[in-house]
Image (cartoon, helix red, strand yellow):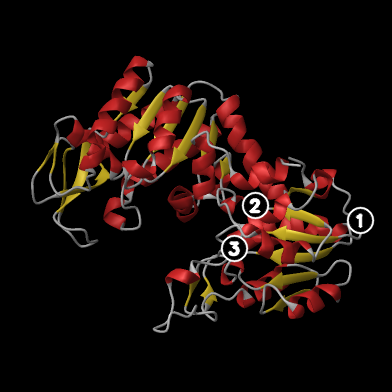
Amino acid sequence: MKSINELDLKGKSVIVRVDFNVPMRDGSITDDSRIKAAIPTLKELAKNNCKVILLSHLGRPQKDTDSQGNIKKKTYSLRLVAERLNELLPYSVSFVDENTGEKVTEAASKLKEGEFLVLENTRFAEGEKNNSAALAADWRALGEIYVNDAFGTAHRNHASTVALAEQFNPDSKGAGLLMSKEVAEGYSVLENPTSPVVAVVGGSKVSDKIGLLENMIDLADEIIIGGGMAYTFIAAQGGLVGNSLLEEDYFQLARKIVKKAKDNNTGIHIPEDSVVADQFHRDAKTKVVSSREISDDWMGLDIGPKAAEQFQKIIMKAGTIIWNGPMGVFEMQPFAKGTEKIAIAIADATSRGAYSLVGGGDSASAVQVLDLTDRMSHISTGGGAMLTLLEGKPLPAVVALESS
């Protein structure tokens, strides 16, 4: 996979797949960090006098249609994103409210060197999620070079990430600076980590993290399990978890993972105690109990103080820390302490010389809320993509950049 630094960019028309899938509320962007993450690549292209056409998706418009089944185009338009990009870049940024057709072709043809054109949401195009070669051919006609800087969509087999890349030869396509860094950081952890390796795996469901857990057994020395998924492991081993989140269909798999870890001399650590509540609400009654003795009318919503202390000690001995998923319902303040303590422990371990990779998604959000961003080695911009990479699976968009 070439990076943009290895491509002949001077004065070329460049199609760039970026990840501008930013959160929106009431017609405003609430977090522009994904736009800012693409700025180094875009400035590099401008420095090379490129004419730049930007492709991105925004949200899941097909799942939020009106009563007639029509996409709410105003809600999912990239117009506001283009306006924000224009504020962030010292170059001209224009927007066209189509993603294919004569209007797009004309706007692209009028681009001058060092100018940017944002096309409308790629997911408005019917063939995007189907990886349509025909749709990719329409975009292919717009440029001489293809650059993918959208690591957050690298696990998607879509037209703008895969079929489009496949229509360029290896000398005319490459990864942007963000994509290159994300892939390098992820594979460095998998292939050359500093021991001991500690994997902190949280989140709500075991089913979402099966591949990660199985891959971590071979890679990590210690695996810490928190979040809702911990209760499936506890119940699978005979514990009483009350109304806690549970996946009974995964009991056998949970026992298999524990056994495999034991056979591999990999430590598996389940929360000794939990903060439980009588309802899923920020104003619920709470108490701390053994994670294996939760009463029928109570549910575990965070790791307890003993578990947090145990996990902190393990983390502080680590040479490499991989974190994917919170320890509890951290968006509700009564159940945020476990995630907060683990995040601080990872930051402290990093300050003492450990390498920490935060796998995007909710973990990255927690780090940002706690203002610990600068104390982590690497925070991924792509939760699903980094999870796929850490599972040891190929990323379709990366494969497409490598192919001839």
Q: Quadrant of the N terminus?
A: top right
Nearest the eye: 371 or 264: 264
Secondary structure under the numbered disc 3 in the rendered image: loop
Q: For the residue labelled by badge 1, is the local secondary structure a helix, a strand or a loop?
A: loop
Instruction: Bin the neighbour count of mark 1 within 10 Å (Cα to Cα): few under 14, some 14-19, many 20 and up.
Output: some
Give the labeled residue for mark 3: 128
| Sequence-first tag of 3 and 1 | 1
Q: Residue furthest right?
A: 10
Q: Which residue is mark 1?
A: 10
Question: SS at mark 2?
Answer: helix
- What is the x, y in percent for residue 204? 32, 48
Q: Amino acid at mark 3?
A: Glu
Q: Residue shown at 31%/33% (left/top)?
A: 309
What's the residue type where badge 1 is placed? Lys
Which numbered disc flags the more N-terminal residue, 2 or 1? 1
Query: Compared with residue 288, is residue 85 higher up or lower down, i.e. above or below?
Result: below
In the rendered image, residue 215, in percent from the top left (x then y), is placed at: 45, 29
In the rendered image, is residue 315 in sight? no
Left or right, 241 with respect to 6, comes to left
Residue 76, percent from left and from top: 54, 74
**Residue neighbourhood size for the residue with mark 3, other residues' Cα within 10 Å, grouped as few (<14), some (14–19), many (≥20):** many
Contact (CB < 8 A) between labels 2 and 1?
no
The answer to which of 249 and 21 lies nearer the viewer is: 249
Task: Determine the CA span between mark 3 and mark 1.
Answer: 29 Å
Amino acid at the residue labelled 2: Val
| Of labels 3 and 1, the one closer to you | 3
Q: Cβ–Cβ below 8 Å for labels 3 and 1?
A: no
Separation of marks 2 and 1 at Cα, in angstroms:
24 Å
Looking at this rendering, what residue extends furthest in the bottom direction? 68
In the picture of the structure, the residue carrying the numbered disc 2 is 162
| Residue 302 seen in render | yes
The vertical placement of 326 against 196, above or below, is below
